[in-house]
């Protein structure tokens, strides 16, 4: 590793989580190449990568952060955090408490307890969590479920035969030719697939046309990928998805548990139909316990698990991590796990499933303990520039060093939904 070890102030060791998760990708690539590939990381760029959305410029303009109704609100007995960046979540949030788009949300929430508000919003299909202490979360059934098991939960079996993809020494990017089908949204999953694309994988991201991704989010996480739209309720698009799965090496999904089951995209069905497919899943709350099927985002998990309470301001208001560290660390960890599973399939015919959750990543962060005093200031991040269909993009380079040189992305983010749903 090059660069400082500490740089963010705060009660939790976010730097170690960031450096560790990115370091796992470098280690997985070195293992895949049997040590032939010189892959390292640079801490200044790790910090930049974890804050990539704030560094992104589209035609010189910075994207907005959280939407108007996303944030902390006082309740009758504490605080709640809401997430309303997506229009359909904002609509459900406002409807759940009888507020309107023009105002009234703050007043409505102030008349409810934190748990009352949380459950009303969740029952309406919105996204929110009461701000809890660490002890409250640890004592809850959801918190206990999140803590069980390893950070990455692997299930492997031996395939009858193995797909032919394997590491080719001398390739410009070590994952060239690997086909990755990306059914993820927001930050964590797209960060994983963006990382795989940076190392040469052919990544095709597929979204539902009725739920478009936020433009800045798509641009920030779309470097080096292709982008298609498929309506899985359509028989024609369902057939297209089946053909993609037949040709894929890896499938990454990032929807809440059970959301894809009605399309036959649950792990059991997929493993029966495509026995050599490597499946990587992530969600907010984990795969057991009372919150397993709830919607969630990084900021919401922070509120529920005690991070927001730990980062309270001098005025006593709940706070947040300096970056969306749960999302990014989960994404890099997932990328590393995919690379390890690709190696296992290539060398030992091992195929299977790996699962991550934001809540389990939060547990890993708390387990790291309190950080030391920061070493020094970070160097200014190295950025790149590319032309795109959205205009000129300025963005943070990857945190990876190949033979001592920072790795750049192969291509700019594509226009949303522009590509045919086929493998090249």
Image (cartoon, grey):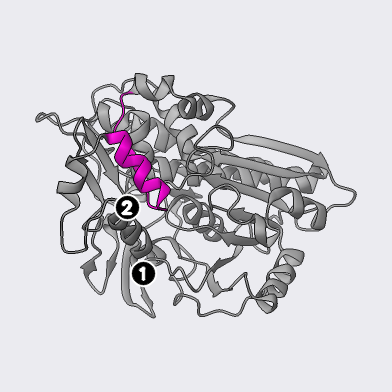
Residue 38 in sight: no
Earlier along the polypeptide chain: callout 2 or callout 1? 2
Q: Quadrant of residue 158?
A: top right
Q: Quadrant of the C terminus?
A: bottom right
Residue 183 is marked as: none
Q: Position of residue 346 (x, y in %)?
A: 78, 48
Q: Nearer the viewer, residue 111 or 183?
A: 111
Q: What are the residue bounds of the magenta stretch?
A: 114-133
Residue 202 in sight: yes
**In the depicted structure, whether residue 191 falls above or below residue 292:** below
User: Are the residues flagged by discs 2 and 1 in contact, CB closer than 8 Å?
Assistant: no
Q: Position of residue 233 (x, y in %)?
A: 62, 71
Q: Nearer the viewer, residue 397 or 110?
A: 110
Q: Nearer the viewer, residue 23 or 417?
A: 417
Q: Quadrant of residue 319?
A: top left
Residue designated by label 2: 96
Residue designated by label 1: 215
Where disc 2 sits, the SS reads: helix
Residue occupying image coordinates x 64% and y 41%: 354
Q: How many marks?
A: 2
**In the depicted structure, whether residue 34 falls above or below residue 78:** below
Q: Position of residue 104 (x, y in %)?
A: 16, 54
Residue occupying image coordinates x 71% and y 57%: 168
Q: Would you say residue 45 sits in the magenta stretch?
A: no
Q: Would you say residue 123 sits in the magenta stretch?
A: yes
The residue most toward the left is 315
Residue 6 placement, left or right of 164: left
Where disc 1 sits, the SS reads: helix
């Amino acid at each position: 590793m090059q660069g400082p070890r500490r740089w963010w102030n705060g009660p939790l060791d976010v730097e170690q989580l960031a450096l560790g998760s990115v370091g796992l990708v470098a280690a997985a690539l070195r293992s895949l190449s049997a040590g032939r590939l010189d892959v390292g990381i640079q801490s200044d760029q790790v910090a930049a990568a974890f804050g990539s959305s704030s560094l992104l410029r589209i035609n010189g303009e910075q994207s907005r952060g959280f939407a108007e109704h996303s944030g902390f609100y006082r309740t009758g007995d504490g605080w709640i955090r809401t997430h309303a960046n997506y229009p359909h979540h904002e609509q459900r949030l406002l409807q759940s408490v009888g507020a309107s788009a023009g105002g009234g949300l703050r007043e409505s929430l102030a008349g409810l307890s934190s748990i009352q508000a949380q459950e009303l919003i969740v029952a309406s299909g919105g996204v929110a969590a009461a701000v809890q202490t660490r002890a409250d979360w640890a004592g809850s059934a959801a918190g206990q479920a999140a803590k069980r098991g390893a950070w990455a939960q692997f299930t492997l079996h031996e395939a009858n035969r193995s797909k032919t993809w394997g590491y080719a020494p001398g390739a410009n990017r070590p994952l060239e030719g690997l086909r990755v089908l990306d059914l993820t949204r927001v930050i964590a999953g797209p960060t994983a697939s963006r990382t795989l694309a940076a190392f040469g994988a052919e990544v095709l991201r597929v979204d539902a046309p009725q739920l478009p991704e936020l433009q800045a989010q798509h641009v920030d996480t779309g470097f080096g990928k292709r982008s298609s739209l498929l309506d899985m309720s359509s028989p024609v698009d369902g057939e297209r998805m089946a053909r993609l799965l037949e040709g894929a090496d890896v499938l990454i999904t990032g929807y809440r548990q059970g959301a894809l089951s009605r399309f036959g995209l649950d792990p059991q069905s997929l493993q029966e139909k495509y026995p050599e497919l490597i499946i990587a899943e992530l969600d907010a709350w984990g795969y057991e316990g009372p919150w397993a099927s709830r919607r969630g985002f990084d900021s919401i998990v922070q509120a529920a698990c005690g991070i927001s309470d730990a980062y309270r301001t001098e005025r006593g208001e709940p706070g947040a991590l300096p970056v969306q560290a749960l999302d990014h660390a989960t994404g890099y960890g997932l990328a590393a796990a995919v690379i390890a599973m690709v190696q296992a399939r290539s060398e030992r015919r091992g195929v299977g499933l790996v699962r991550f959750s934001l809540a389990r990543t939060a547990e890993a962060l708390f387990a790291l303990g309190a950080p030391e005093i920061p070493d020094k200031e970070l160097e200014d991040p190295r950025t790149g520039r590319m032309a795109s269909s959205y205009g000129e993009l300025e963005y943070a380079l990857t945190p990876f060093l190949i033979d001592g040189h920072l790795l750049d992305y192969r291509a700019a983010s594509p226009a949303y939904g522009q590509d045919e749903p086929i493998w090249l």
